[in-house]
Image: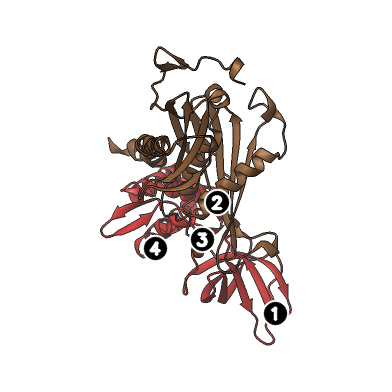
Amino acid sequence: MLGIYDEREIVPLEGTWKANVGDSVVGTVASAKGSVCIVDLSSFVRGLIVLRKYETAPEKGSIISAVIRDVENRRTAILEGSSELHGGILMKVKPSKVPRLIGKSNTMINQIADLTAVRIVVGMNGLVWISGENSARAVAAIERVCEEAHVPGLTMRIKEMLEKEKGIIGNDIEKGTI
Amino acid sequence: MKSNKPELIVNNKRLDGRNFDELRPLSIKAGVIDNASGSAYVEWGNNKIIAAVYGPKEAMPKHMMDPSKAIIKCRYAMSPFSNLSEHGRSGPSRRSTEISKVIKEVFENVVFLNEFPGSEIDIFVEVLQGDGGTRAAGITAASVAMASAGIPMRDLVYAVSVGRIDDKLALDLNMIEDNYSDSDMPIAVAPRDGEILLLQMDGGLSREQLSRGISMVLSAGKDISKKQIDALKENYDSISKKYES
């Protein structure tokens, strides 16, 4: 495995996502028939939502976020607590970069969300949902995080980058028009 | 055949001026195809090869799926412009089917297939320009592509061929040597424990020549392994360097 050796453990630089119980994921609904709804997690693991009585299935193609309740045979993830994400865009990043993108106690992702004033939902499977008028800036920041994930001092660089951009159109943000 | 065999050894050197245990110049670049999970481009002498790895993804067709482990598929192909003569036709041939199969079997032995039950991993090896030893170069490239895809492997495989010209053993045969040599033997090795994952042979070698050939491969393999690892590091180092100063 390709990774950086860091204090007794290897931090992978590249890799595939393995479904773990408790992971929050983002995916698109691939099919919804009867009481079972299959979610495409853009991985070899597929998500499954078992609908309760009277619960309506989400529409095919809609984007949802959910938490993994159980993993069967490493291949099927039973999801719970699903909520539909309306509008917005879906972006794919390498699953190995997701921990860096979230940051220690969510610092990185909160910083990007705050400075660009967008809503971001990150799935451990590598799908990121972004909604808001500044989505393009958030996408650029996320892409940079993934590219430079292994270089120290990243949080500061992203902060600098976003604040610089904000400075150019800063007045509009303060007025609340963006 | 013997009658039109060209002189392959001149002044105790080979036709391209190499020593008998010398590799052709090798350069590897990882991550050349953005859409693939992992990829590599190899220039090995006049060989130019792109390898790409996709997956793990859901195994298709369904009946080939193995619920206990991943399956590996491999497609080796020579492009129509890769070579002067008979390999120039596009589409699968006897030869490319065989090479696809042996490459697949090499990787079935090093990838942790149990990690991805019910999935498939696709390897594509495309020869843009061929000059002898493409299956060895293809395995070397595919191995880097596999590592850059982050697929867990037991070892970073390399492959190189060794052959016999008259009574002398020569490493890494090129096209002319391959066509006219007395024996040609591509070998793929897992370098950590020296396990041999592929060994094919045309022509004949004596028992003593065989073991000498394998030790030639193992000692030259250190260079190849180093180049493979450097190629994988390079993409990350180049970004790190921007911020070092």
Foreground: disc 3 or disc 1: 3
**Residue B132, quarter of the rendered image:** top right
Q: Is residue B199 or residue B63 the one in the foreground?
A: B199
The amino acid marked with disc number 4 is Asn
What's the mark number on residue A56? 1
**Are the two marked residues, 3 and 1, in contact with CB atoms closer than 8 angstroms?**
no
> Which residue position holds label 2?
B105
Residue A136 lies, in percent from the top left, at 55, 48
What's the mark number on residue B47? none
The crowd level at tag 2 (other Cα within 10 Å; few <14, some 14-19, many 20+) is some
The crowd level at tag 4 (other Cα within 10 Å; few <14, some 14-19, many 20+) is few
Foreground: disc 2 or disc 1: 2
> Which residue position holds label 4?
A106
**Are the two marked residues, 2 and 1, in contact with CB atoms closer than 8 angstroms?**
no
The amino acid marked with disc number 2 is Glu
Alpha carbon separation for disc pair 4 and 2? 43 Å
Marks 1 and 4 share the same chain: yes
Q: Which chain is brown?
A: B
